[in-house]
Image (tube, rainbow, N blue to C red):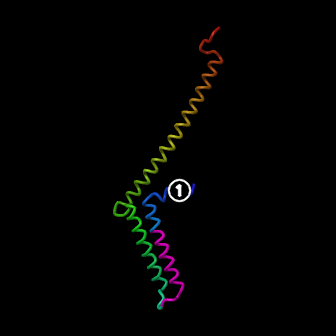
C-alpha cells in the first residue's frame, strides 16, 4: 500500500519538485545547524541572527516550492479554497451515492419480502 502511494507520488511532477525542494531545505537546515554547533567559524553568529537567517531560508524555499506547483501569486488562496470546496463536493457526492445505494437495496429487499408474503398468502387470487 505504501509502495503504491510512493509510486504514484513519484510519477507526479509537482510531488517530485516539492520533494526536491524539501530535501534541499533539509540539507541547508542540517548544514546551518552543524555550522552553528561546530564553533569552527570565527565570529560565531548570534542566536537571533541565526534564527532570522533560518526563517528567511525556509520562507524562500516554501515560496519557490509553491511557485513550482503553480500556487503563487495573488489568486493562490482562492485556488486553494476552490480545491478544498471541490474536495468537499466530491465527499458529499460519495456520501450521497452510498446512502442512495443503501436505500435502493433496502427497498428491493422489502419489496421482495412483501411479494413473497403476498404469494404465500395468495392475496392476488391464486388457483383454487
Q: Residue at x 57, y 33 (%)?
A: 105
Q: Main secondary structure of the magenta part?
A: helix
Q: Which residues are magenta?
A: 21-41
Q: Quadrant of the N terminus?
A: bottom right
Residue 67, x across and y down, in percent = 38, 65
The residue carrying pointer 1 sits among few (fewer than 14), some (14 to 19) or many (20 or more) residues within 10 Å by Cα, namely: few
Q: Residue at x 48, y 70 (%)?
A: 23
Q: Residue furthest top?
A: 128
Secondary-structure class at tag 1: helix
68 part of magenta stretch: no
Question: Compared with residue 58, is residue 106 higher up or lower down, i.e. above or below?
Answer: above
Question: Compared with residue 95, is residue 50 higher up or lower down, i.e. above or below?
Answer: below
Q: Residue at x 43, y 52 (%)?
A: 85
Question: Compared with residue 41, is residue 93 higher up or lower down, i.e. above or below?
Answer: above
Residue 127, x across and y down, in percent = 63, 10
Q: Residue at x 49, y 74 (%)?
A: 27
Residue 89, x across and y down, in percent = 45, 47
Question: Compared with residue 37, is residue 19 higher up or lower down, i.e. above or below?
Answer: above
Residue 38, x across and y down, in percent = 54, 86
* Count of all numbered marks drawn on residues in the image: 1
Nearer to me, 44 or 99: 44
Q: Residue furthest bottom?
A: 42
Residue with the mark numbered 1:
5
Q: Residue furthest left?
A: 74
| Quarter occupied by residue 126 | top right
| Quarter occupied by residue 119 | top right
Q: Quadrant of the C terminus?
A: top right
Nearer to me, 88 or 69: 69
Amino acid at each position: 500500500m505504501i509502495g503504491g502511494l510512493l509510486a504514484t507520488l513519484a510519477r507526479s511532477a509537482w510531488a517530485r519538485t516539492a520533494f526536491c525542494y524539501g530535501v534541499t531545505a533539509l540539507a541547508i537546515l542540517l548544514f546551518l545547524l552543524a555550522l552553528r554547533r561546530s564553533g569552527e567559524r570565527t565570529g560565531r553568529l548570534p542566536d537571533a541572527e541565526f534564527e532570522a537567517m533560518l526563517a528567511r531560508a525556509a520562507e524562500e524555499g516554501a515560496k519557490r516550492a509553491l511557485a513550482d506547483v503553480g500556487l503563487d501569486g495573488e489568486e493562490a488562496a482562492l485556488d486553494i479554497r476552490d480545491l478544498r470546496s471541490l474536495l468537499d463536493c466530491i465527499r458529499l457526492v460519495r456520501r450521497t451515492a452510498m446512502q442512495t445505494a443503501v436505500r435502493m437495496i433496502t427497498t428491493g429487499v422489502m419489496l421482495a419480502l412483501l411479494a413473497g408474503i403476498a404469494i404465500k398468502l395468495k392475496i392476488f387470487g391464486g388457483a383454487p
